[in-house]
Amino acid sequence: MSMSRCPKPECGGFTFELQELKVNGAQFRMYAVQCSACGAVVAVKEFENTNALVIKRSDDLEQKISRVAERVDRIARKVGVV
Ligand SMILES: [Zn+2]
């Protein structure tokens, strides 16, 4: 596998870092993936990992729904519906 390199020919750096990027007018905070040597930006990412947030929210909702379902079962048994 070839190694990723900085796109600036005069640099040729091969290590990269995340740097918070201020973008005027942007609704969300962003990260720049930049060359550690010269700062050339090679990619821009959302500050938060949206996929991870969606998965966490989904897990939280599943747990809440499960707790509500347990309570409904208990109530149903008490009133003799089940
Ligand atoms: Zn560079």
Image (cartoon, grey):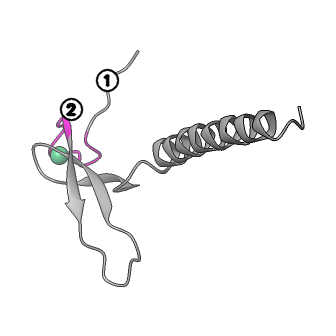
Q: Hey, what amino acid is under mark 2?
A: Phe
* Quarter of the image where the C terminus is located: top right
Q: Which residue is mark 2?
A: 14
State yes or no: discs 1 and 2 in contact (Cβ < 8 Å): yes
Q: Dot 1: what SS?
A: loop
Please state which amino acid type lies under the numbered disc 1: Met
Neighbourhood count class around disc 2 (C-alpha, 10 Å): few under 14, some 14–19, many 20 upward: few
Give the percent coordinates (x, y) of residue 80: 86, 35
The x and y percentages for residue 56 are: 49, 42
Give the CA separation, mark 1 to mark 2. 7 Å
Would you name the residue on which mark 1 appears? 3
Q: Is residue 29 left or right of residue 70?
A: left
Q: What is the magenta segment's predominant secondary structure?
A: loop
Q: Position of residue 74 (x, y in %)?
A: 71, 35
State whether residue 58 is above or below residue 31: above
Residue most extreme to the top:
1
User: Which residues are the magenta region?
Assistant: 6-16
Image location (x, y in percent) of residue 5: 27, 35
Q: Quadrant of the N terminus?
A: top left
* Extreme residue toward the right, this view: 81
Q: Is residue 13 magenta?
A: yes
Does residue 37 sit above or below 25 in this rendering? above
**Kind of element beneath mark 2:** loop
Is 78 positioned to the left or the right of 24 in the image? right
Looking at the image, which residue is at 47% across and 42% down?
52
At x 57%, y 37%, the residue is 63
Q: Say left or right for 56 vs 66.
A: left
